[in-house]
Image (cartoon, rainbow, N blue to C red):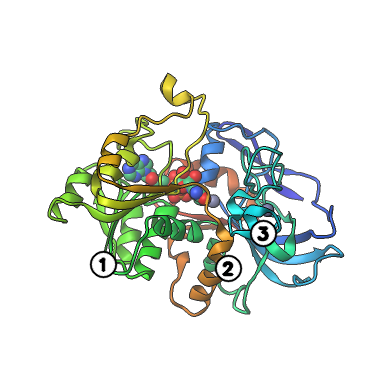
Amino acid sequence: MKAVVYRSPRDVRVEQVPDPRIEKPTDAIVRITSTNICGSDLHMYEGRTSFEPGRVFGHENLGEVVEVGDAVEKIKVGDMVSAPFNVSCGHCRNCERQLTNYCLTANTPGIAGAAYGFADMGPWQGGQAEYLRVPWADFDALRLPEDARDRENDYVMLSDIFPTGWHSTEMAGLYPGDTVVIYGAGPVGLMAALSATLKSASRVWIVDRHPDRLRLAEEIGAIPIDDSKVDPVQFVLDQTNGWGADCGCECVGYQAHDPMGQEHNNDTLDKLVRSVKFTGRIGTVGVYVPQDPKAPDEFEKQGKVPFDFGLHWFKGQAQGAGQCPVKRYNRNLRSLIHENKCTPSWIVSHELPLERAPEAYKAFDARENGWTKVVLKPQMSAS
Ligand SMILES: NC(=O)c1ccc[n+]([C@@H]2O[C@H](COP(=O)([O-])OP(=O)(O)OC[C@H]3O[C@@H](n4cnc5c(N)ncnc54)[C@H](O)[C@@H]3O)[C@@H](O)[C@H]2O)c1
Ligand SMILES: [Zn+2]
Ligand SMILES: [Zn+2]
């Protein structure tokens, strides 16, 4: 089959790779019909992780089940399913507690948490390909309703970014009527804004410097803050009698940079501490890594962040961080889509055949104007 293979920093190619097959009786094989490029792929694409050349990308996967192992009972051939980016067994101590983001059996011993096509997240092949092997299929695959084929660009967001945006508002303790400040208006920040809106936040500020992304946030009622023009912390303080937002979401991660492009891995974390109120909570879903050999300075190379813990402590704030447990939310978010309470596909800018993945990676990585979210369609003809 064809798949998007990582070769070296900023070099992905569409190559022939072996078809996945049923390896355990609990597996299913899914023919991928929609698979997104994610901001998480870009850390790997840029060579800022240990992702191995030759591996296949893709953890935001949706498609049709074409084969199931003998032990699969619920999922049937022909079902349209969304596969959470977390690979999880369903029976370990963490999975039992809905901590599928830190499954104890799906990665190598000593590391909790696994994902498709992801650095340090186990051996699982990615789904930017014609087919994907989904292990523990009865637990991991979420069946989609009868409108699945008509609304793939909405449902494909269930595998990662919609639940992840939602999770950041959960960790932030967002309650109806609260105000929230979100750093990053990429796909994840936009989903955090959507989630905050669905939860009836009274005001949602969102910080970025890309006008196309800020415009999408504005379309759902968020207040855009362009940090190349104004100081986002002061902006929020001015609108909250100097106190700050009730809570905050970090949707950028360790490659946070200033509008000129210079990286500072503490930038958004420190700004959140300053623009969230005393006792406010912060939900950090942007990725941070234990080692970052290509970081701009020695300290950061060790994965360390010069974080303003003094002020964070002084303000009595709390913070949650880490991968999103997609399964905790995807069933309910599926219902919100199905019942027309939201259309997360509003951020999709491009639907492309797999063959065009290399140019899509290039443009999305450069955050080119108008490239807000790419959905690859492996069954779409390239011509
Ligand atoms: N925790 C999880 O489970 C999970 C899941 C998916 C993605 N992620 C992570 O979420 C982060 C965002 O992903 P995305 O898909 O939205 O990607 P993205 O990289 O396209 O979006 C990030 C946005 O942040 C903006 N930005 C950069 N520095 C900034 C700063 N200092 N202040 C304000 N905005 C700034 C960029 O302009 C960009 O629009 C990534 O780190 C990704 O790896 C985490
Ligand atoms: Zn993702
Ligand atoms: Zn598990």
Q: Is residue 42 left or right of residue 284?
A: right
Number of other residues with Cα within 10 Å of mark 2, as a class: few under 14, some 14 to 19, many 20 or more:
many
The image shows residue 349, relative to residue 228, as above or below, that is below
For residue 92, what is the image quadrant? bottom right
CA separation in Å, label 3 and label 2: 17 Å
For residue 381, the mark is 3
Q: Kindly state the secondary structure of the residue where label 1 is placed.
A: loop
Instruction: Tell how many labels.
Output: 3
Quadrant of the image containing the C terminus: bottom right
For residue 152, the mark is 2
The alpha-carbon separation of the residues under discs 2 and 1 comes to 30 Å
Residue type indicated by callout 1: Ser
Query: Upstream in the sequence, badge 2 or badge 1?
Result: 2
Q: Left or right of 208: which side holds 114?
A: right
| Callout 2–callout 1 Cβ contact below 8 Å | no
* Left or right of 161 in this view: 148: right
At 20% from the left and 43% from the top, the residue drawn is 231
Q: Residue at x 73, y 55 (%)?
A: 132
What amino acid is labelled 3 in the image?
Ser
Q: Is 197 on the left-hand or right-hand side of 294?
A: left
Camera-side mark, 1 or 3: 1
What x and y, as percent, mark residue 87? 66, 52
Q: Is residue 363 visible?
A: no
- Closer to the chain start, of discs 3 and 2, is 2
Which of the two discs, 1 and 3, labels the residue nearer the N terminus?
Answer: 1
What label does residue 202 carry, if any? Answer: 1
Q: Secondary structure at mark 2?
A: helix
Disc 1 vs disc 3: Cβ atoms closer than 8 Å? Answer: no
Tag 3–tag 2 contact (CB < 8 Å): no
